[in-house]
Image: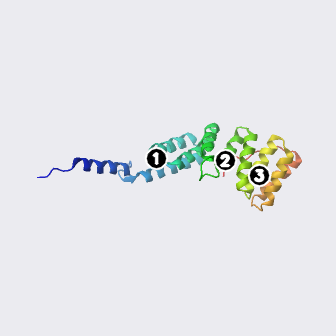
Amino acid sequence: MTRPAVGKNLTIAICLCGVLWMASDGFAVTVQQKVNTLTSQAIKYSKQGKGLQALQYINQAIKIQPRNQNLYYQRAFILGRAGIYSKAIQEFTRFSQMKGYPHAIRFRADCFMAVDDMRSAVKDYLTFLRKESKDGKVWSYLAEAYALMGDTRSALAAVNKGLSTGSHWSGRLNSLKGQILRGEKIIPHKPLSN
């Protein structure tokens, strides 16, 4: 009579536990499916303005896959949409220094605008536009930041550069140009709205 290899069976059981997750309805799902579900819920709640619920879901996903950088990137958006700009800035700062996240610096600029740090916002928008010079939307954001700083000349220059791109944002840029020339109050875009 041969004895079963207990170590081998234990290893297989441990591997299975790492791959499967029991859902509340009794069906087994993969870890990735669970993370995807949690992330989808987080994004949904974030877009509905339920930031604290969204943070709970994304943090659960991060606990399951702590090495998944995309989850931390999603958390930065959720933090920003929830108005927790200082933490969002910290998260986006980390991603702005990583390859694969070219828009992180633009999103950080949005957060800087939200906390009324226009100089940092301008710096980030300019950095982004050096690589993405055809982005009419970001030219409009830069123009807003300059206008809010009281730098009319730079604001109008940003509007004109944005208009020269032929972007579908030309309507917004022309409207912004008119507001600046008439000395009207500029209401900045909602951070992380797009």
- Find the distance from the CA under tag 2 to the CA under tag 3: 16 Å
Residue type, numbered disc 1:
Gln
- Judging depth in this view, the residue of 152 and 2 nearest the camera is 2
Residue 193 visible in the displayed image: yes
Q: Please, is residue 133 above or below residue 191 in the view?
A: below
Residue type, mark 3 in image: Ser
Q: Which residue was labeled with disc 2?
A: 105
On the rendered structure, is 29 left or right of 148? left
Q: Position of residue 111 (x, y in %)?
A: 67, 42
Mark 1 highlights which residue? Answer: 65
Q: Is residue 100 above or below residue 85?
A: below
Q: Nearer the viewer, mark 2 or mark 3?
A: 2
**Alpha-carbon span between mark 2 and mark 1:** 24 Å
Give the structural element (helix, strand or loop) at label 1.
Answer: loop
Please state the horizontal and vertical placement of residue 170, each as a whole percent of the image. Answer: 78, 58
Chain-order first, disc 2 or disc 3? 2
Sequence-first disc among 2 and 1: 1
Left/right of residue 138 with respect to residue 69 in the rendered view = right
